[in-house]
Amino acid sequence: MYQFLIPWKTLATLIVILLVWGCTGGNEKLYFSSLSDGWAQQEEIQFLFSPEKINHPTNLYIYLRNDDDYPFSNIHLITTLKTPIGETLIDTLSYSMATPDGEWIGQGYWIHENKLWYKEAYRFSAVGEYRLGIRPAMRHNEQAKSIEVLEGITEVGIGIEEIQAEQ
């Protein structure tokens, strides 16, 4: 019986590896930062990366993972992308996180993963280290004061995907 279990464990491991690799498309680099006690409004999560190709079209994504404690149907983010040559690109972004009837848009049951467009076919202009900062910009309706800690966001990440030339 022991000899029978070994191939099944090996097969199960291979299936998991293939599923994880297949879900990322194979050419997307992912970076994540975990949040244990919510996301403080003034906390900018920073990602450092060096693109492999310059002047090559690249899709950039923001990944958000939330649980059912997230109290909103949308999210507003402020991003700051700093290039190696000193340029700074600041964007204010808005994304839907749930449908009008309250169903989460992201994939998953307990943790919902949202893959959100950040920049489409972006071309990195210089060799070196880039810094992408992401912070929330949420407040309750009819209130000017921002929320101190945004509950329900468990992880924030970025995806960098080189666009493959069609053969």
Image (cartoon, rainbow, N blue to C red):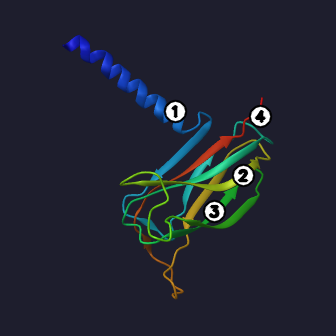
| Mark before the other along the chain sequence, 4 or 3 | 3
What's the residue type where badge 4 is placed? Ala
Task: Identify the residue position indicated by label 1 in the image.
Answer: 21
Residue 79: which numbered mark, if any?
Answer: 3
Q: CA distance from mark 1 to mark 3?
A: 28 Å
Label 2: few (<14), some (14–19) or many (≥20) C-alpha neighbours in 10 Å: few
Task: Identify the residue position indicated by label 2 in the image.
Answer: 120
- Residue at 74% over, 37% down: 53
Q: CA distance from mark 1 to mark 4?
A: 20 Å
Task: Identify the residue position indicated by label 4 in the image.
Answer: 165
Q: Nearer the viewer, residue 77 or 23?
A: 23
| Mark before the other along the chain sequence, 1 or 3 | 1
Label 4: few (<14), some (14–19) or many (≥20) C-alpha neighbours in 10 Å: few
| Mark before the other along the chain sequence, 1 or 4 | 1
What's the residue type where badge 1 is placed? Trp
Q: CA distance from mark 4 to mark 2?
A: 15 Å
- Residue at 59% over, 46% down: 159
- Residue at 77% over, 34% down: 165
- Residue at 54% over, 63% down: 44
| Mark before the other along the chain sequence, 4 or 2 | 2
SS for callout 3 = strand
